[in-house]
Image: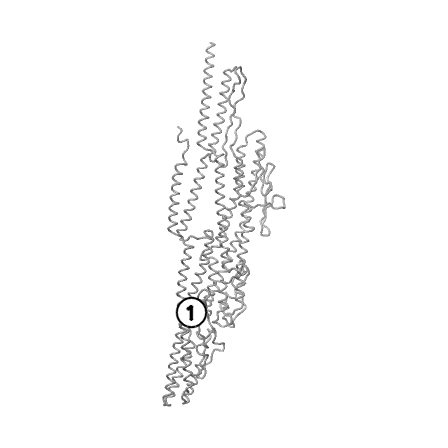
Amino acid sequence: MAGLNDVLNSARSALIAQQFALATTSNNVANASTPGYSRQRVDFQPAPSTPTNAGLLGTGVVASQIGRVRERFLDQQVWGSSDTSGKASTEQTILSQVEAAVNEPSDAGLSETLNGLFNAFQGLSSQPEEQAARDNVVEQGQLVAQSFRNISANITQLRGDLVNDVQSKISNINELTGEISDLDVQIANASSQGMDPSSLEDRRDSKIDSLASLVKVNVVDNADGSSTVSIGGTIVASKTGAVTLTASATGGQIQVFADHSTQPTSVTSGELGADIECYNTTLPGYLTKLDATANALISRMNALHASGFGIDNPPTTGLAFFTGSSATDIAVNPVLVADSNKVAASADGSTGDNAVALQMANVQNEANMNGGTTTISQYYNTLVSSIGTAINAAQNTSTNQQLVLTQLQNQRTSVSGVSIDEEMTNLIQFQQAYDAASKVVSVVDQLFQSVIQMVQ
Amino acid sequence: MRITQTTIASTFLNNINDTRERINDEQTELASGKRVMKVSDDPVATNTILRLKAFLGNNAQYQKNNAQAQTQAEATESALSSFSDLMVSLKGVLSQATNGANTADYKTYSDQVDELLSQAVELGNTQSNGVYIFGGTNTKQQPFTLAADHSTVTANPNGITGTIQYPVNEGVTQTVNIDGQQAFQGTAIFELMINVKNELEAGQAPTTAESQSVDGFLSSVTAATGKAGAMIQDLDNNDTQLAAQQTQLQQLLSVQQDSDVAETTIKMNQDQLELQAALSSGASVLPKTLLDFLR
């Protein structure tokens, strides 16, 4: 037998449930532009029915659960793509700095100064007696040496800066894993007490978002809503605590170690991976090639120069043109800088002979690198284009991965994002439901009055 | 797909960003006039550009060398042609001395020959750009020294021979000197003149053999002059060739490096149009929500 009280009760449950829904809608609208926020939804359930003569009678509605709308699969995909995108864009930034150090094609690049040196020797061959031609050779030699040293110093400097960058990224990672681990503890606690951990989960997931672009992470979800995050096979954050990472640069290699482990953790991707790869492999590769270029130039020019004679009296012979052996220490022999008459152009000591100057000018066309297949200039030019190609590759990967990532993020917001239109539509629905429930209450009120008047 | 305000906003921003980036690239290209500013703009073209620039640099140096060689060759030719004029005068004096029975004039002839000797040695010591052109490779040492009493002419003991070659084109070297040995057979011409002078002074008529020697020397100097002329001809041709090569190299470089202004301008106009369209559509779409229609 259904009484008026039952009607009143079910109307009351509707009022409460719609209030929940309105509060949730209001919260969604408030967080419409909060990064990492997932829209929340109230699940309504019919309240348990009571048996009557006519059958089971409904007793209203219950707001059973407030939960976030989130697709875990999309999260995993976003995290899986973030590291590739982060690596490519960081790599692009670093290589662009190498490109700036090399500064080609320009009128001041090493390629142009090398031409200048060979041309100066050509010029010397046409005026071996001329002081100006000799000074020009020394000056162009110094420009070449300077260019080599500058490029080498800039790349070395960049490499040094990468160590600092790695350290700051490592501390950023440690901060993030610490926060993730704290949030996981809170999530596990909330779950065990039957509370809704949605907002905690949102905060944790946006921390993982940040972490995922720095380094490749693997995230495993636990039944209690907490997650276990690992980097390169090492668990770095879970509800049992965070593991701090340290980076050490020894022997020209940066390695990352987890807490007390002596075994390095492999970091190959993400922004951190790009830094480490450039420091360990890419930049040393460029430096080696630059040194090889400088070394080939030094040894060939020196051998020729030592065989020739200056125009001083008596003619000096056996001098090296360059000192040093690599791009870091190449310099024009100070003896020649002090007296350019000692520059050897002549093969026999006579002032007008230019055989050695001609030979030195011809080094430009000598294939004496790569086992006698490549000239010095070609070798260097190939190095320059390889830098450009590497930048282009990083640029393309970065653009492509960014597209993939944007697509995935759009899909994620498509599921989890707040749509104002939708919230407004819901608002109208909930408002009308609330109005209707209020109407029921007022009708029941009138009925009660009728009943009371009936008795009077 | 469910589209939220955030999706619209981020898509809008991404697109605007892409378009602005393109406009920036195009603007840089137009402002600099260059398509390849950095290696990464076109790594393959950069390689070609660097190679072409090296060729152009070499070409400029070859042109300088060529001009220098031309100066030297012209100085050589002019000195040698003066020398052959001098030989003609010598021949005249000799024939006068041989034919004219007037032995009283021998002193005058002797003086004339002596004068010619001084001039000849002077020509042998011709300098151009501060170097002795007939000194072989010993360009800073005077090749011929006439003794104060005009009794001997000595050649530079360090030698007056040696070929000087300038690189004047890719793999081409051009000989730019005729050494004293080739031009004057060492000091033979001067010695002959001294002999003739001494004989005349002593009242002896020059011998037929001596006249024949002068003829021989005249033809060898004329041949050397012709050689210098041929050198000048070669260098002139080379100069024309170098200029043509330079033009060609510059065209090739321009193709690789320079911006196609018309194409880039059109692209930029398109991108600007796109940007305007994106901005105006964004401005009308972004602020719209259901709220605008709820009363």
The number of numbered badges drawn on the structure is 1
Q: Residue furthest top?
A: A456
How is this picture coloured?
A: one colour
Residue found 46% across the figure and 62% down from its top: A116
Q: Is residue A67 left or right of residue B206?
A: right
Can residue B269 be seen here? The reply is yes
Q: Which residue is mark 1?
A: B69
Pointer 1 chain: B
**In this orientation, which residue lies closer to the viewer: A262 or A301?**
A301
Where residue B111 sits: x, y (%)? 39, 85
- Where is B235 relative to B97, above or below? above
Where residue A95 sits: x, y (%)? 50, 50
Where residue A389 sits: x, y (%)? 49, 51
Snapshot quadrant of residue B107: bottom left
Can residue A333 be seen here? The reply is no
Q: Amino acid at mark 1?
A: Ala
- Where is A35 relative to B156, above or below? above
Residue found 48% across the figure and 77% down from its top: B156
- Where is A318 relative to B277, above or below? below
Q: Is residue A266 left or right of residue A430?
A: right
Where residue A183 sits: x, y (%)? 56, 36
Q: What element does badge 1 sit on? A: helix
Residue found 51% across the figure and 47% down from its top: A90
**In this orientation, which residue lies closer to the viewer: A76 or B110?**
A76
- Where is A292 relative to A426, above or below? below
Residues packed near mark 1 inside 10 Å, few (<14), some (14 to 19) or many (20 plus): many
**In this orientation, which residue lies closer to the viewer: B50 or A147?**
B50
